[in-house]
Image: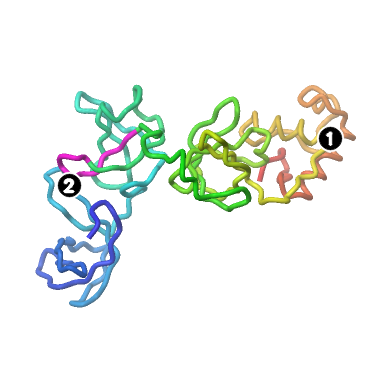
Amino acid sequence: MEIGKTNKLKVSKEDDRAYTLVDENNNEVELDKNPEIDKLDIGDEIDVFVYKEDDNHTIATTVKPYAQYEEFAFLKVTSVNKFGAFIDWGMPNELMVPFSEQAGNLEEENWYLFFILKDEETGRLIGSRKVNDFVFFDDIDVKQGDEVDLLLYNLTDLGINVIVNNMFKGLIFRSDIHKNIHSGDKIKGYVKQVRDDGKIDVTLEPPGYKLSIDKNSEIILKALNENKGILKLTDKSSPEDIKQILGLSKKAFKRSLGNLYKQKIINLESDGIKLT
């Protein structure tokens, strides 16, 4: 039975309050009965998340956290006090981030990237902001062209930082961003190159995919990215408005709109254009 992970366990007995679940080695844990759980019979199997509560009592639950043991997640800080910071991880009790794992001040209501680990003394799950302690910079097992899982977490002047396959650090350069993306998004990407420092450059399009984007289209995309993916311009807008906002003639603007729309990069709406 793995603490801090989802386990498939078997019902071995029950009483009025709870089911007793066991793993293949007959390790036991209790699952409290509640209206959200369908009735279980002896011998039934069920997927449950197993973890330690604040009193070190191990329990099982059908509630799924936003992240499990040894996973990265983009989570919100709900409170900060003399004991540490606390984050919303999708469970009834918030997850603690000790001061020793904060790597800088954390502010309430802000979102940060965390890694979920176990406290060495109690075995309870805690969060850490020390990203570099939990990613690998050698023995990289991906190569150019591979499809990878991305967790986006920090926008910089260069682009947006990402966690690759829950193991490596990567970057999507601004010049490679042609869609509306945000910190916290979990999306697919493709390895552009593995750098000598062990970090990975990533793109959002598969190898060989080439956007047919002219200079005027790039101007529109840049303006969209700088305005949260939305521009209050349409093919009905006045030449003066288009010139003032983009510096383009109406003819050039309409031609580039058609190009971007055909490639499904933008949506044309009655009140403006949006990145897909």
Place residue 103 in its image quadrant: top left
Where disc 2 sits, the SS reads loop
Cα–Cα span, label 2 and label 1: 59 Å
Tell me the residue at 13%/46% (across/down): 56
Identify the residue under disc 1.
Answer: 253
Residue visible at 24% across and 57% down? 2
Relative horizontal placement of residue 27, taking residue 197 as reference (left or right): left
Kind of residue sitting beneath label 1: Phe
Query: What x and y, as percent, mark residue 254?
Result: 85, 39
User: Residue 188, how many percent across, how many down?
Assistant: 56, 50
For residue 1, above or below residue 80? below
Find out whether the residues at labels 2 and 1 contact each other: C-beta distance under 8 Å: no
Instruction: Please indicate whether residue 199 sits to the left or right of residue 25 in the image.
Output: right
Instruction: Tell me where the magenta segment starts and ends, as one range.
Output: 119-128
Residue at which label 2 appears = 53
Q: Earlier in the sequence, mark 2 or mark 1?
A: 2
- The secondary structure making up most of the magenta span is loop
Q: Please indicate whether residue 176 sits to the left or right of residue 112 in the image.
A: right
Left or right of 164? Residue 90 is: left
Residue type (three-letter) at the residue carrying disc 2: Glu
Looking at the rendered image, the quarter that the N terminus falls into is: bottom left
What is the count of numbered marks? Answer: 2
Residue neighbourhood size for the residue with mark 1, other residues' Cα within 10 Å, grouped as few (<14), some (14–19), many (≥20)? many
